[in-house]
Image (spheres, rainbow, N blue to C red):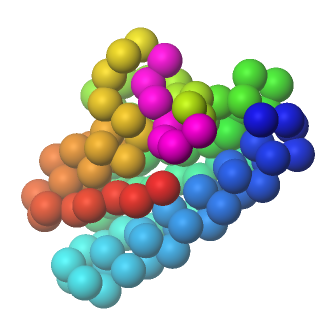
């Protein structure tokens, strides 16, 4: 994947995640605020817990920061895989957001 392909993919992911956060607010009656600033998306849940997702173009990685830790993901041609062998990005975000909200949230990327 070249840099322009990465930028297009990462932009689409951040847009999609921001839209999903808006949907969760209505669907689950949650107080969620999604703020986008360039290549950084911050999702703040009603209990002031933040999840930050951002793109790292030089490394062609997506990064996730949450109270459970920091995670780095690279695209393998089908999905965004954890650089340390953990769950893929969608599964990790689903676990994080479900734990924070107390609802069963399924994240897609």
Residue 101 visible in image: no
- The residue lying at 32 percent from left, 78 percent from top is 25
Query: Which of the pair 5/64 is nearer the observer?
Result: 5
| Residue 100 on image: x %, y % | 21, 50
| Residue 74 on image: x %, y % | 58, 29
Query: Which of the pair 38/44 is nearer the observer?
Result: 38
Query: Which of the pair 102/8 is nearer the observer?
Result: 8
Left or right of residue 99: residue 55: right
Give above or below for 36 relative to 9. Answer: below
The question of residue 79 being in magenta is answered with: yes
- The residue lying at 30 percent from left, 44 percent from top is 91
Q: How many marks?
A: 0
- Report which quarter residue 4 is drawn in: top right
Is the N terminus in the top left, top right, bottom left or bottom right quadrant?
A: top right
Residue projecting furthest to the bottom: 26
Span colored in magenta = 77-83
- Report which quarter residue 31 is drawn in: bottom left
The question of residue 75 being in magenta is answered with: no
- Report which quarter residue 76 is drawn in: top right
| Residue 109 on image: x %, y % | 48, 56
Residue 35 visible in image: yes
Left or right of residue 102: residue 22: right
- The residue lying at 78 percent from left, 55 percent from top is 8
Residue projecting furthest to the front: 77
Left or right of residue 5: residue 109: left
């Amino acid at each position: 994947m070249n840099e322009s392909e990465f930028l297009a993919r990462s932009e689409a992911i951040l847009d999609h995640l921001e839209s999903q956060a808006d949907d969760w607010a209505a669907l689950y009656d949650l107080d969620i605020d999604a703020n986008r600033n360039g290549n950084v998306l911050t999702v703040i849940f009603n209990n002031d817990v933040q999840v930050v997702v951002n793109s790292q173009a030089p490394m062609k990685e997506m990064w996730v920061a949450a109270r459970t830790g920091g995670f780095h993901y690279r695209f393998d041609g089908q999905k965004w895989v954890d650089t340390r062998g953990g769950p893929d990005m969608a599964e990790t975000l689903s676990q994080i957001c479900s734990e924070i909200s107390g609802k069963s949230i399924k994240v897609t990327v």
